[in-house]
Image: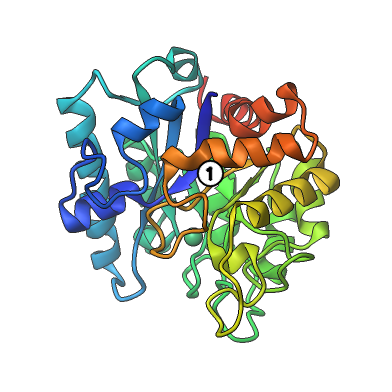
Amino acid sequence: MRYADAHADTFYRIALEELDPFQREGGLHVNVPRTREVGQVLQVCSVFTPARYSGKGAEDFARRVIATLDHWAECRPDAFLRVRAAPDLSALGGEVLGLIPWLEGASPLRGELPLLDEFFALGVRGIGLVHNHANEVADGCGVPDPRRGLSEFGRELVSRMEALGMAVDCAHLPQPAFNDVMAAVMRPPCISHVGARSLVNIVRNADDAMLRAVAERGGFVGIDFYPGHVLSGAFEPGVREANVADIADHVLHAIHVCGTDHVGLGGDFDGFNDACQGLRHVGELPNLERELRSRGLSDITIEKIFSANLLRYLGEILPP
Ligand SMILES: [Zn+2]
């Protein structure tokens, strides 16, 4: 199997907790021994900024996470490759894991476009426009009655990101802002990590119209592995544990809505503690592969879902 993943908080955790990505049992969902075992070739690395960091704090925190990633990539070129442009994607494979830093929430930009250029120069190649809280771009999905759509800064940001060769990521965007982004984009957008709302009805998940809108624009949708997104009432008393079959349900639903060319995986590993049964860490991905095969997916579709669709998407978006 070749695996490419659209969202993990691994380097955020490495920066914050000083964890070692080479330890198999070191507490990380995604670590080098396991990515090698499953043939992972690419990890999009979330640079998440907690809501408590505002103003310059967010910017400095994001720089710190990117510096941690740079440090590991420079020290271990045998294990990591920084992916900055489309041609880098063809160098992936073997024992080397491609890394792409990606802001989760545009808070570090503080509403200033020059900071976008600076983060681009640091290698950031995608931005999830919001997280759960509101920022300078729009309301996030955790805002009660999130009516504030894309701001004027948000429009400028989207257009500048597209010109630079960065992915516009709609994860965590509630409906009004999502619709604004769909009206604004000229290039394919993505939702890096999400579940299907028609299976688990929460604002954080994408409804069929949202999934279709991304696919119609040639974009990419990554299904995530967070129990609360793939099983209704996960963590509530009396509800069974979420498992790998629940994740497969969301993958199949997304394929049903988007077709086989626009769906992949953005596990959100290292972004939560209680993982789904059968997919506790990246080393257990073969369980998801088996499950999807048992539901009738062909070899070609499996390859698209596990790597080819994300690599194709990034090949179109990243600088040439
Ligand atoms: Zn997220």
Q: Give the position of the N terminus as an image quadrant.
A: top right
> Which residue shows up at 21% across the image and 52% down it?
15
Q: Nearer the viewer, residue 258 or 153?
A: 258
Q: Residue at x 32, y 43 (%)?
A: 118
**Residue at 19% over, 24% down:** 76
- Position of 213 compared to 107: left or right? right
For the rendered model, the colour scheme is rainbow
Along the horizontal axis of the image, is 153 left or right of 261?
Answer: left
User: Is 294 situated above or below 247?
Assistant: above
Above or below: residue 305 compared with residue 8: above
Using the image, determine if residue 291 lies above or below residue 208. above
Of residues 236 and 196, the one nearer the viewer is 236
Point out residue 74 in the picture as x, y percentages from the top left corner: 18, 26
Residue type for callout 1? Arg
The yes-or-no answer for disc 1 within 8 Å of ligand 1 is no
> Residue 32: x, y in percent?
30, 33
Report the front residue among 168 and 201: 201
**Secondary structure category for the residue under label 1:** helix
Q: Position of residue 319 (x, y in %)?
A: 50, 25
- Residue at screen point 57% across, 30% down: 314
From the image, tell me which residue sits under label 1.
Answer: 160
Residue 51 visible? The answer is yes
- Few, some or many residues within 10 Å of mark 1 (<14, 14–19, 20+): some
